[in-house]
Image: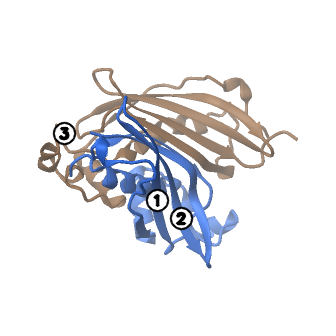
Chain colours: A blue, B brown
Amino acid sequence: MARLGFDQVNVGDEIPALSKVVKREEVKAYADASGDQNPLHQDDNFARSVGFPGIIAHGMFTMAHLVKAVTDWAGDPGALKRMKVQFRAVVFMDETIVARGRVESVDPETRRARLSVWVEVDRAGERQLPIKNSEAEVELK
Amino acid sequence: MPLNQSLKGKEYPEVAFTVERDQVLQFADAVSEDAAPFRDPEGAKAAGYPEQVAPPTFVTKVQILSSAQVVTDQELGLNYMMVVHGEQEFEWGRPVVVGDELRATPRIADIYAKGRHEYLVIEAELKDASGETVGISRSTLISRGTAER
C-alpha cells in the first residue's frame, strides 16, 4: 500500500465502488468487536417489536465499510483525516451494500481532497441510501 | 418526555482505554480490513507505522464506552429504546495503534428539537498518554418523537 499522490487525484474522480453482502454472523461479530450489543442488531423478535421486519446492521458497521472503500482508494489508513456521515436508511441481513465516493475539491495548500461519500442498497428495484449527504477528507502525498 | 436541555455542555468523567492487539484483530476481522498494517506489526512497520494499526473506526469502541455515561444519565431523561444513530463524525489526528493508552472526556455538545424529534450531540476528544489529540468523535443520536408539541 502506498498513499496516493496529490498529482494523481482530480476533481470528479470516483473511487472504486466497494460491495459487500451483509451477513448475520458478521453483524454479530461487529457487535462483539465494537461493544454495541443493542438487541436491534441481534434479536429478530426485539427488532419486530420496534417496527422492523428483522434485525438491522449497526450504522457504524456500514460506516466502517465506507471507510474501507476510501482508505483502500487512498492507499493508506492514515490518509483519512475526517469523515462525517448521515444515516438515512436501515440495512437488513443479506442485502448488498455498495460504498461510493467522488472527489469534490482539492486543496494544494493542505494537499487534501474533499470527497462526497455515500452507501447504496438496491431494495426491490429501488435505490436506498443508508448513508447519504456525507463527506470525507483525505490527505494526499 | 422531552430531554433535559439544561444539561447542554455537561462534561462526564474521563474514560481510559488501552488498545490491545487481540481487540484490533477482532475489530479488523469484523469490518473485513485485510490490509497488512491492520494484521500484524511487521505489516504496519513496512507501511511506516510504529505498531499494528487499528482500523479508523476502531475509535467507535471508545465512543461507545464514553457515551454510555451520557445515555444512562438519569437527569437527561433519554429512553434508549427510542434512539437511533442519526449522524457520526470522526476527525483523526493520527491512526490508533496497538499499545495506545487513550483517554476520552465526553460532553453533551448540544441538545435541540426539530419537528417531533430531539437531537443529542455527544462529543469526545481522544488523547494519548502524551496528551496529543488522536481523534475527535461527534455522535448525533435521535430521540424519536420526544419533542414537546
Q: Nearer the viewer, mark 1 or mark 2?
A: 1
- Give x and y (percent) for residue B28: 30, 55
Where does residue B76 sit, x and y in percent of width and height?
Answer: 68, 33
For label 2, the crowd category at 10 Å Cα-Cα, with few meaning under 14, some 14 to 19 and many 20 or more, is many
x, y (%) of residue B127? 36, 26
Residue at the spot of label 2: A120
Disc 1: which residue? A100
Count of labels in the image: 3
Can residue A131 be seen here? The reply is: yes
- Numbered tag placed on residue B98 in the rendering: none
SS at badge 3? loop
Q: Residue at x 84, y 39 (%)?
A: B148
Label 3, label 1: how far apart the Cα atoms are: 27 Å
Disc 3 residue type (three-letter): Tyr
Q: Is residue B31 above or below residue B89?
A: below
* Disc 3: CA contacts within 10 A as few (<14), some (14-19) or many (>=20): some
Asked if marks 1 and 2 touch (Cβ < 8 Å), the reply is yes
**Most foreground residue, B132 or A4:** A4
Q: Helix, strand or loop at disc 1? A: strand
| Residue at which label 3 appears | B49
Q: Residue at x 33, y 61 (%)?
A: B32
Name the residue nearer the viewer: B92 or A133. Answer: A133
Q: Give the residue type that dot 2 points to.
A: Glu
Q: Residue B122's quadrant in the figure?
A: top right
* Residue B87 percent location from the top left of the image: 58, 45
N-terminal of the pair, mark 1 or mark 2, is: 1
Same chain under badges 3 and 1? The reply is no
Extreme-right residue of the structure: B149
Q: Quadrant of the N terminus of chain B?
A: top right
Element at label 2: strand
